[in-house]
Amino acid sequence: MSIGKELQMALLPSIEELSSNGKKGDWAFVQDTHLAVKYDETEWGVVILPIKVSPSGQKPWEWNGSRESPTLSPSILVHGSKDGNIPRWHGWLREGILVEA
């Protein structure tokens, strides 16, 4: 049973490449401490999630350690902006596949 739309993702070499040429569902690692995910085709549709404890103590997402087929837990929720420039999105990253709720 499918919960929502699934997108096969692709690892890109940098967040700059992700922001400028990435497609919905692509991702890039940022300094090996964060995972950036393109969740929407708009220019603001990238979310950056911690996958390792930061110096500030920010709790990271649980990550399966795979660069090729990452899984994060819990789900990803982007609240978006009131003006709609930053879209709202909710879903999961499971084995390299972005699944919308």
Image (tube, rainbow, N blue to C red):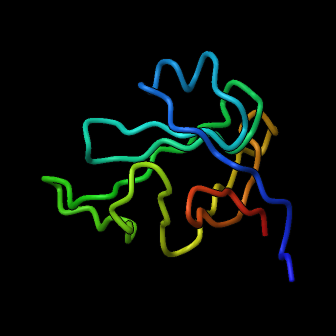
The answer to which of 45 and 11 lies nearer the viewer is 11
Give the vertical position of 59 relative to 96 (above or below). Answer: below
Query: From the viewer's perspective, is 15 left or right of 34?
Result: right
Residue 14: name its quadrant: top left
Q: Residue at x 69, y 24 (%)?
A: 43
Q: Residue at x 85, y 68 (%)?
A: 4
Residue extending farthest to the left is 55
- Return the x and y of residue 88 as percentages of the image width and height: 75, 52
Give the vertical position of 34 relative to 100 (above or below). Answer: above
Q: Residue at x 59, y 37 (%)?
A: 46
Give the vertical position of 7 relative to 24 (above or below). Answer: below
Q: Residue at x 38, y 39 (%)?
A: 29
The answer to which of 83 and 92 lies nearer the viewer is 92
Query: From the viewer's perspective, is 75 left or right of 89?
Result: left
Where, quadrant-wise, is the C terminus in this rendering?
Answer: bottom right
- Return the x and y of residue 24 as percentages of the image width and height: 72, 38
Residue 26: name its quadrant: top right
- Return the x and y of residue 86 as percentages of the image width and height: 71, 38
How many tags in the picture?
0
Residue 89: name its quadrant: bottom right
Residue extending farthest to the front is 68
- Return the x and y of residue 73 as percentages of the image width and height: 48, 73
Give the vertical position of 29 relative to 65 (above or below). Answer: above
Where, quadrant-wise, is the N terminus in this rendering?
Answer: bottom right
